[in-house]
Image (cartoon, helix red, strand yellow):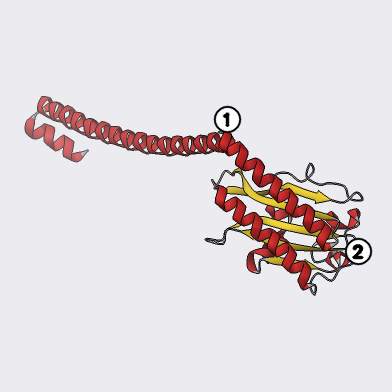
């Protein structure tokens, strides 16, 4: 305040007022320019985010469109039919040769994406074979999360197989599998990973179930049988990709 009074005394009131308005105008312009720059930067950031989202949506739509397209070529239909029939025949033979009650091929697939953009790991029964005393499961176990079978997924990822001689022993260690098998009268089972021959990618797994206690962990014949089926399925699927 003292400085303003001194300036008025030295230069007069009018020059000081003019100088004040000039200073105010310059300061306002700088503030306005800064605000506009900030707005431009924020708009640029927003546009970048929008472009990224559009890109993700476009990629997702393209993938969904490709994976769910209804029109297939005659060659694709013939090849898929041939592979599907072959897998069913291999499972049918495995049930008979191993004295099993139920055989399944469970395939891994993508179940969409979470908010974090990570895709949800899911699996579905795509093929099964069963005797006349066994109820099929395919219609009930479709598109369910792989986390439903954490112990099985862990074992086949690490070793390629899982052997269970007595389902009753899983009541505490693997309740999901126990509750899946026990009500249906399953006493033993063997699981074998289905993998590509080139890079060993897990495509899913084959399961043989037994309603009689079976020492699958000791039976090399059954182990080789289910391993051969898994290799055949992996090879057939890899060739058609």
Q: Most extreme residue toward the bottom, as rendered? A: 218
- Which residue sits at x=69%, y=63%? 228
Residue occupied by mark 1: 71
Q: Can you say whether 67 is above or below 134 in the image?
A: above
Specify the quadrant that holds the N terminus. Answer: top left
Left or right: 73, with 86 as reference point: left
- Which residue sits at x=7%, y=31%? 11
Left or right: 52, with 108 as reference point: left
Choose the circle earlier in sequence order: 1 or 2: 1
Q: Most extreme residue toward the left, as rendered? A: 11
Left or right: 73, with 182 as reference point: left
As helix, strand or loop, the secondary structure at mark 2 comes to loop
Residue occupied by mark 2: 212
Percent position of residue 204, x then y: 66, 55
Residue 144 appearing in the image:
no
Percent position of residue 203, x then y: 62, 54
């Amino acid at each position: 305040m003292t400085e303003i009074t001194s300036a008025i005394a030295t230069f007069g009131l009018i020059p000081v007022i003019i100088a004040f308005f000039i200073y105010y105008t310059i300061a306002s312009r700088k503030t306005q320019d800064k605000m506009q720059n900030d707005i431009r930067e924020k708009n640029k950031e927003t546009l970048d985010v929008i472009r990224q989202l559009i890109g993700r949506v476009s990629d997702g739509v393209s993938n969904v469109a490709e994976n769910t397209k209804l029109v297939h070529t005659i060659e694709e239909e013939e090849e898929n039919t041939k592979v599907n029939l072959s897998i069913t025949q291999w499972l049918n033979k495995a049930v008979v040769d191993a004295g099993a009650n139920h055989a399944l091929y469970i395939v891994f697939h993508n179940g969409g994406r979470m908010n974090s953009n990570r895709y949800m790991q899911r699996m579905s029964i795509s093929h099964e074979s069963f005797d006349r005393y066994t109820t099929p499961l395919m219609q009930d176990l479709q598109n369910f999360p792989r986390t439903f079978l954490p112990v099985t997924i862990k074992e086949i990822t690490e070793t390629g197989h899982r052997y269970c001689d007595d389902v009753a022993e899983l009541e505490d260690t693997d309740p999901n599998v126990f509750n899946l098998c026990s009500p249906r009268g399953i006493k033993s089972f063997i699981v074998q990973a289905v993998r590509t021959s080139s890079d060993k990618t897990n495509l899913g797994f084959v399961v043989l179930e037994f309603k009689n206690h079976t020492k699958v962990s000791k039976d090399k014949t059954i182990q080789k049988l289910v391993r051969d089926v898994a290799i055949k399925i992996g090879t057939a699927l890899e060739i058609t990709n």
